[in-house]
């Protein structure tokens, strides 16, 4: 066991993956000597050298596009996109190429590219540094999308993503990079089950009265809300989705069949989001046990605002509690 | 043809005039010196075969057997010439019109039509031919090619001094693709990484209807200057010159000398695809001018001057071309509908809950019709 921050845990996971497989490379802007703007690749350039920790030109389409070419030759590139809002120059490469090569080649070409994206807000950043674009990618078949909420998941998921033969985007909640927790860094790594393990949701807190579904950056808010409403006699079950694609519907539905109520929380704008997807699935699979409509708590349908307004924009503990109140009055 | 700019033949390397006269070039003549008459006759044959295939595919589309066809008509010399300069160990990243190069890499031409008939998106095994799948998103593959070349370099396949081992990538794209951001990024990545890659731009003068003057102020080869790599313009209708400049560039790339850019100035004699209508945007006079510069006729004129073009050889090649066209037609018309499970297979390499659920639902749905029939 080791006490690690989320950033430190991902760093440790990257190191393990690089030690295990010489084909693993890190590519991105400032990932070398600087160790990344969030220091997630800290020390790796020094220990593995510039051939394996590659500072690329400042061109995101190029990062992902050349990573695809390298993956076609058996490498396992891990691309860092410096901030969520800067992934869009690579959107074409990710959605029309990376996501589709295995399919369009009838499985003859695998592109095991991992893309790491520090995402979501809450750190008082300037424009384009706080966004949550996960569903833009989840809507494209061929990409696996995960988001760790804990250092343990940061450590495990980055290794699972790298080991997976499929392209994986790891959305890392940057506001949680400095949260510390105990991480089991010594458990043997299971490559054969990596993809499957990565796709499972986790019950982070048990309760019988309401199911609160969250992931990545909103797990903290969800757990805090659960703590508060416990004082008011409402036991919330909190589910950490961990994976957006695939979405572990069965873990959510199992919980809702117990509680009859469901609230989904994410930082991305509410319309057309993960919350809408979860609500639809719950309606399809657990409609007759529902005591109340499924509610979504997300950001407003507005561009990410200036930093002084971000706490009004993002789902807060109070807004989650408000939703819990509204589903439990029924 | 214009006097200057991307639609002129300013600075092109040419080893054959359009009437088949041999020219000397201070640098490139020696790179074509190994083309003996047997090879030249084979090159002519290959161009004829590819054109016959192209013609057959166009007919198949017109008869409703293909959804679409993208002709390579007029670009045979650029493709066959450059393709002859490649080694089996080299890797090709085509765009979607490189049927001539596909042919030289051993791809069964009939397989290409599987894509255009709607059977599948990729119809050959890239590893078997060192010929990647066609890419329809313009210029996206220039970055894949660059990354692939960077990986070959890491794998020690460059600059070993062993000609049997050294290899490089050639990436084909067009004048339209030259304006794409991905092409600029690919040139940058290739240059700063000294990647073993040759960018081979076929400037066929049109991106569908838009002339190259709307893509660039300068001849496209000059884009190399901006990233500090060699760039050369070649007469793309001169198979000898296309071979010579590609050979020189590939030798440099294989030996560790880094990337370069070739602009093959040619003319798309056909339409962009069978859905296009070139009469709306170009003149008959322009087409006639370029028909006089037909790449196949040019090599034929040269071979005739050399006394190497006999009626017997022409008849033999025409027979081969006819047989190939018939084979392509038979194979294409025999193609059935792909199996339904192709819809779900290979979305991911490992099982994915959503794909599994969709597949299971669809199978149940289809079975429901079978059950109904049984009960009745």
Image: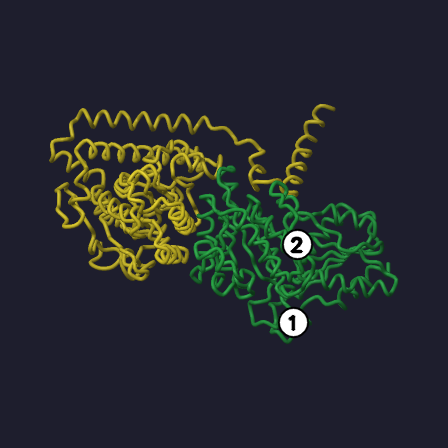
Q: Residue at x 59, y 38 (%)?
A: B344
Q: Secondary structure at mark 1?
A: helix
Q: Is residue B149 left or right of residue B247?
A: right
> Which of disc 1 and disc 2 is earlier in sequence?
2
Relative to residue A28, is residue B106 depicted above or below?
above
Where is residue A39, by image quadrant?
bottom right
Q: Give percent across and percent down for residue B318.
A: 25, 27
Residue picked out by circle 1: A310
Q: Is residue B218 left or right of residue A134?
A: left
Q: Secondary structure at mark 2?
A: helix
Q: Give percent across and percent down for residue B50.
A: 31, 35
Q: Chain of mark 1?
A: A
Q: How many marks?
A: 2
Q: Is residue B188 left or right of residue A328?
A: left
Do the dots labelled 2 and 1 sit on one chain?
A: yes
**Cα–Cα span, label 2 and label 1:** 26 Å
Q: Which mark is residue A153?
A: 2
What is chain A's hue in the picture?
green
Q: Which chain is yellow?
A: B
Q: Chain of mark 2?
A: A
Where is residue B212, by image quadrant?
bottom left
Relative to residue A149, is residue A187 depicted above or below?
above
């Amino acid at each position: 066991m080791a006490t690690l921050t989320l950033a430190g845990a991902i760093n440790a996971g990257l190191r393990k993956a690089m030690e295990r497989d010489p084909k693993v490379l890190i590519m991105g802007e400032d990932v070398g000597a600087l160790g990344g703007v969030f220091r997630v690749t800290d020390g790796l350039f020094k220990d593995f050298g510039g051939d394996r920790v590659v500072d690329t030109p400042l061109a995101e389409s190029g990062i992902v596009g050349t990573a695809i070419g390298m993956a076609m030759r058996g490498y396992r590139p891990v691309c860092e996109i410096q901030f969520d809002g800067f992934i869009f120059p690579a959107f074409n490469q990710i959605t029309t190429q990376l996501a589709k090569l295995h399919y369009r080649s009838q499985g003859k070409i695998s592109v095991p590219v991992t893309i790491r994206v520090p995402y979501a807000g809450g750190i008082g950043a300037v424009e384009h540094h706080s966004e949550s674009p996960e569903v833009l990618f989840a809507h494209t078949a061929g990409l696996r999308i995960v988001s760790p909420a804990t250092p343990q998941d940061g450590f495990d998921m980055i290794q699972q993503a790298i080991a997976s033969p499929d392209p994986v985007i790891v959305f890392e909640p940057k506001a949680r990079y400095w949260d510390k927790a105990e991480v089991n860094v010594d458990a043997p790594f299971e490559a054969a089950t990596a993809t499957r393990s990565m796709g499972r949701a986790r019950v982070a807190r048990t309760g019988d009265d309401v199911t609160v579904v969250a992931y990545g950056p909103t797990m903290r808010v969800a757990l805090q809300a659960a703590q508060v409403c416990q004082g008011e006699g409402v036991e919330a079950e909190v589910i950490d989705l961990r994976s957006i694609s695939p979405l572990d519907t069965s873990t959510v539905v199992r919980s809702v069949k117990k509680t009859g109520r469901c609230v989904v929380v994410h930082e991305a704008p509410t319309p057309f989001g993960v919350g809408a997807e979860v609500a639809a699935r719950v309606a399809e699979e657990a409609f007759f046990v529902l005591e109340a409509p499924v509610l979504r708590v997300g950001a407003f349908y507005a561009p990410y605002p200036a930093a002084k307004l971000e706490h009004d924009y993002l789902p807060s503990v109070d807004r989650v509690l408000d939703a819990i109140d509204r589903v439990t009055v029924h | 043809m214009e006097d200057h700019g991307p639609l002129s033949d300013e600075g092109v390397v040419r080893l054959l005039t359009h009437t088949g006269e041999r020219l000397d070039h201070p640098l490139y003549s020696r790179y074509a010196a190994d083309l003996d008459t047997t090879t030249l006759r084979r090159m002519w044959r290959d161009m004829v075969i590819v054109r016959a295939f192209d013609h057959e595919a166009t007919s198949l589309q017109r008869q409703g057997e293909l959804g679409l066809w993208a002709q390579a008509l007029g670009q045979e010399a650029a493709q066959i010439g450059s393709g002859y300069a490649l080694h089996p160990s080299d890797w090709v990243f085509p765009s979607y019109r490189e049927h001539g190069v596909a042919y030289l890499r051993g791809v069964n031409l009939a397989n290409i039509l599987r894509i255009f008939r709607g059977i599948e998106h990729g119809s050959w095994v890239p590893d078997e031919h060192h010929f990647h799948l066609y890419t329809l998103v313009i210029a996206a593959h220039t970055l894949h090619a660059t990354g692939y070349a960077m990986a070959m370099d890491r794998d020690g396949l460059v600059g070993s001094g062993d000609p049997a081992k050294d290899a490089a990538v050639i990436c084909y794209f067009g004048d339209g693709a030259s304006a794409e951001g991905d092409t600029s990024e690919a040139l940058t990545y290739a240059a700063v990484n000294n990647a073993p890659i040759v960018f081979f731009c076929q400037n066929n003068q049109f991106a569908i209807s838009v002339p190259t003057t709307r893509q660039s102020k300068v001849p496209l080869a000059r884009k190399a200057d901006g990233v500090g790599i060699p760039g050369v313009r070649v007469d793309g209708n001169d198979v000898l010159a296309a071979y010579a400049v590609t050979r020189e560039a590939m030798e440099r790339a294989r030996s560790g000398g880094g990337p370069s850019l070739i602009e093959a100035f040619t003319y798309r004699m056909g339409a962009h695809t069978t859905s296009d209508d070139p009469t709306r945007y170009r003149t008959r006079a322009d087409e006639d001018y370029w028909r006089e510069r037909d790449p196949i006729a040019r090599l034929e004129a040269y071979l005739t001057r050399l006394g190497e073009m006999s009626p017997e050889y022409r008849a033999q090649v025409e027979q081969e071309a006819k047989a190939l066209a018939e084979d392509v037609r038979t194979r294409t018309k025999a193609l059935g509908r792909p199996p339904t499970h192709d819809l779900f297979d290979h979305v991911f390499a490992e099982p994915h809950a959503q794909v599994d659920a969709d597949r299971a639902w669809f199978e149940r749905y289809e079975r429901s019709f079978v059950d109904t029939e049984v009960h009745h």
